[in-house]
Amino acid sequence: IVRMDADDIALNQRLETQLKFMMTHPQIDVLGTGVHLFEHHTNKHLKDIIYPCVNTTAIKWCCLFYCPLHHPTVMIRKNTRFLLKYDDTYNHCEDYYLWFKLLFEHRCQFANLNSVHLK
């Protein structure tokens, strides 16, 4: 399952890179990437955000301080889809709560690529 918002732009090789990683790391359930932020009207580059937490242990630690994944960059294994349920009581932080629940309650394995694949 690949996430992306309607106004996002997948960079070349995004799907290929993420799929290759998922195929060579079968233990990973959720994979995120860095994101290239830009001004929509001018296409001016603002900044790239690449999280330093690249494996499950680091992502759990980062989760204590901030949301460790860019939601529209994730690729999720199909068998994990049954666990993907938003909780409406966590308005404005549904994504963060979902990752937290998958990491700590369901013990899913996460990774982040240290490269940008979405803008």
Image: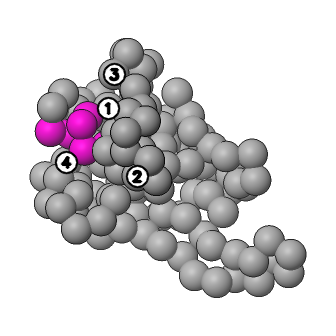
Q: Nearer the viewer, mark 2 or mark 1?
A: 2
User: Which is more N-terminal, label 3 or label 1?
Assistant: 1
Q: Are marks 2 and 1 in contact (CB under 8 Å)?
A: no
Residue 93, label in figure: 2
**Quadrant of the image occupied by residue 58:** bottom left
Badge 4 marks a residue whose secondary structure is helix
Q: Residue furthest front?
A: 89
Mark 2 burial class by Cα count in 10 Å: few <14, some 14-19, many 20+: few
Q: Nearer the viewer, mark 4 or mark 3?
A: 3
- Kind of residue indicated by mark 1: Asp
Q: CA distance from mark 4 to mark 3?
A: 17 Å
Type of secondary structure dominating the magenta stretch = helix
Residue drawn at 40 percent across, 52 percent down: 93
Q: CA distance from mark 4 to mark 2?
A: 20 Å
Q: Nearer the viewer, residue 97 or 16?
A: 97
User: Which is more N-terminal, label 2 or label 4?
Assistant: 4
Q: What span is colored magenta in the figure?
A: 99-104
User: Which is more N-terminal, label 1 or label 2?
Assistant: 1
Q: CA distance from mark 4 to mark 1?
A: 10 Å
Residue drawn at 67 percent across, 46 percent down: 5
Residue under circle 4?
56
In the visual, does 77 lie left or right of 14? left
- Kind of residue indicated by mark 2: Cys
Q: CA distance from mark 2 to mark 1?
A: 21 Å
Badge 2 marks a residue whose secondary structure is loop
**Quadrant of the image occupied by residue 41:** bottom right
Residue under circle 1?
29
Residue drawn at 22 percent across, 68 percent down: 65
Q: Is residue 8 magenta?
A: no
